[in-house]
């Protein structure tokens, strides 16, 4: 993934997720909202997700946003 693509992922989720890359090269994102409810957790929402690269993280975050939109 190109640097511009990484910046796009960071920009897309700014204000919603805190995104960083670990020293080992894995990508992480943590929600910037309050704790999830039991219902949200049961619907497979996560407070923190991780992936091998920024592209995979983008896919995970897109899915998390989709799940959040269908969960109260």
Image: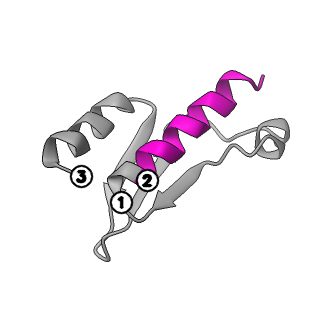
Q: Indicate the secondary structure of the residue bearing disc 1.
A: loop
Tell me: residue 37, above or below residue 55: above
Tell me: residue 62, above or below residue 59: above
Spatial separation of the CA atoms under disc 1 and disc 3: 8 Å
- Residue 53's label in the rendered image is 1
* Residue in view at x 43 percent, y 57 percent: 28
Q: Residues within 10 Å of mark 2 (few under 14, many from 20)?
A: some
* Residue in view at x 28 percent, y 74 percent: 23
Left or right? Give the position of 18 relative to 39: left
Residues at marks 1 and 3 touching, judged by CB atoms closer than 8 Å? yes
* Residue in view at x 57 percent, y 31 percent: 65
Left or right? Give the position of 1 relative to 15: left
Q: Residues within 10 Å of mark 3 (few under 14, many from 20)?
A: few
> Mark 3 or mark 2: which comes first in sequence?
3
The colour scheme used to paint the residues is one colour
Magenta-highlighted residues = 56-72
User: Residue 69: where, in percent of width, then height?
Assistant: 66, 22
Q: Residues within 10 Å of mark 1 (few under 14, many from 20)?
A: some
Spatial separation of the CA atoms under disc 2 and disc 1: 5 Å
* Residue 58 falls within the magenta-colored stretch: yes
- Residue 56's label in the rendered image is 2
Q: Quadrant of residue 24?
A: bottom left
Q: Quadrant of residue 39?
A: top right
**46 and 59: which is toward the camera:** 59
**10 and 30: which is toward the camera:** 10
> Mark 1 or mark 3: which comes first in sequence?
3
Give the main secondary structure, helix, strand or loop, of the magenta stretch.
Answer: helix
User: Residue 20: where, in percent of width, then height?
Assistant: 33, 55
User: Residue 37: where, in percent of width, then height?
Assistant: 78, 38
């Amino acid at each position: 993934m190109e640097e511009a693509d990484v910046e796009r992922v960071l920009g897309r989720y700014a204000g919603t997720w805190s995104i960083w890359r670990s020293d080992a090269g894995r990508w992480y994102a943590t929600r910037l909202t309050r704790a999830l409810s039991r219902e949200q957790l049961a619907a497979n929402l996560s407070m923190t997700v991780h992936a091998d690269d920024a592209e995979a993280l983008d896919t995970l975050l897109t899915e998390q946003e989709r799940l959040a939109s269908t969960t109260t």
